[in-house]
Image (cartoon, rainbow, N blue to C red):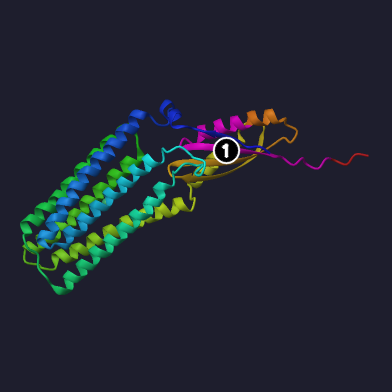
Amino acid sequence: MHTVTGTREPADYVAGRFDDAGDRRQANRAVGVSAVGLAVTGLVELGIAVLTGSVGLLGDALHNLSDVSTSLVVFLGFRVSRRTPSERYSYGLERAEDLAGLGVALVVWASAVFAGWESAHKLLAGSGTSHVGAGIAAAALGIVGNQLVARYKLRVGRRIQSATLVSDAKHSWLDALSSAGALAGLVAVAAGQRWGDPVAGLAVTLFICHVGWEVTTDIGHRLLDGVDPGVLTAAEHAAATVPGVRHAHARARWTGRTLRIEIEAWVDPALPIAATDQLGGRVIEAVHEAVAEARAVTVIPRAMPEPASPATS
Ligand SMILES: [Zn+2]
């Protein structure tokens, strides 16, 4: 049996109702501006962390810089995934993003280990923190920076109805809490409690572990071809409602940011090939209609076994 494939090219996206080019530009700008803001915040924090010896600040700086590297990978992945398929890479280079994600996960876990190690070491050694005022200012910058980024992403995200951007905004809002933890530790140090900073450092380390866990499970899910089960039921239901399709079975996987859906459609075995082809086209339409994020839909027609005919004499 031959297969029918329908792909939505980026041009269809621009023209279609699924994703508007202007929205995409706005989302990209929001992610870009936020990344620059967070990078500046993280670098200032890192410099002050080295000056003061504050491990709470060190952890918060590493956390912010890890977040920036995640955004950077999304950006690079977006660029690389636009490469057209070649003879050797017939699906394009979309999985480059997942590959880079593995690198990001590694960096995040390494910074968690580093921040945790430094905090535990400082706590046990009972070493002090210098220039506490500068440290407090840097932690406050961390709070303000993350809050500004959170508000900005939330505003743009709501305007263009981007769930990713809104959840990203919530992440930045939580990150302001991490900076507040570093701040609390330094305030405790200013009040004469040496342990305040290393304890804050350990708390911030937990935040970094949380980011590491999220990045790792997300990448694992994609590399193992995990997909939201709702996508499969929606696709199967849409395919089965096309007249002429007697039964449908769906499989789906992401390659980078492309959701590929494969539909096995059982049809009347007597159907001529041209009619089967047309039917496949209608199934593709229906699946695109039902699953907005689907980029490539392939239909494999199968001959429906005829029910055993009653014995004739
Ligand atoms: Zn974060």
- Residue 109: x, y in percent? 31, 60
Q: Residue at x 10, y 59 (%)?
A: 51
- The residue that disc 1 covers is 298
Q: Based on the displayed image, in which of its 4 quarters is residue 54 positioned? A: bottom left
Residue range (magenta): 280-309
- Residue 239: x, y in percent? 59, 36
- Give left or right: position of 96 versus 7: left
Q: Based on the displayed image, in which of its 4 quarters is residue 131 positioned? A: bottom left
Number of numbered discs overlaid on the protein picture: 1
* Quarter of the picture holding the N terminus: top right
Compared with 10, 74 (above or below) is below
Q: Secondary structure at mark 1?
A: strand
* Quarter of the picture holding the C terminus: top right
Q: Residue furthest bottom?
A: 125
Which one is nearer the viewer's eye here, 134 or 170? Answer: 134
- Give left or right: position of 197 versus 110: left
Give neighbour class at mark 1: few <14, some 14-19, many 20+ (Cα, 10 Å): many
| Amino acid bearing label 1 | Thr
Compared with 177, 206 (above or below) is below
Compared with 277, 204 (above or below) is below
- Give left or right: position of 110 versus 15: left
- Residue 241: x, y in percent? 60, 33
Question: Is residue 281 covered in magenta?
Answer: yes
Viewer can see residue 243: no
Q: Residue furthest right?
A: 313
- Residue 214: x, y in percent? 35, 54
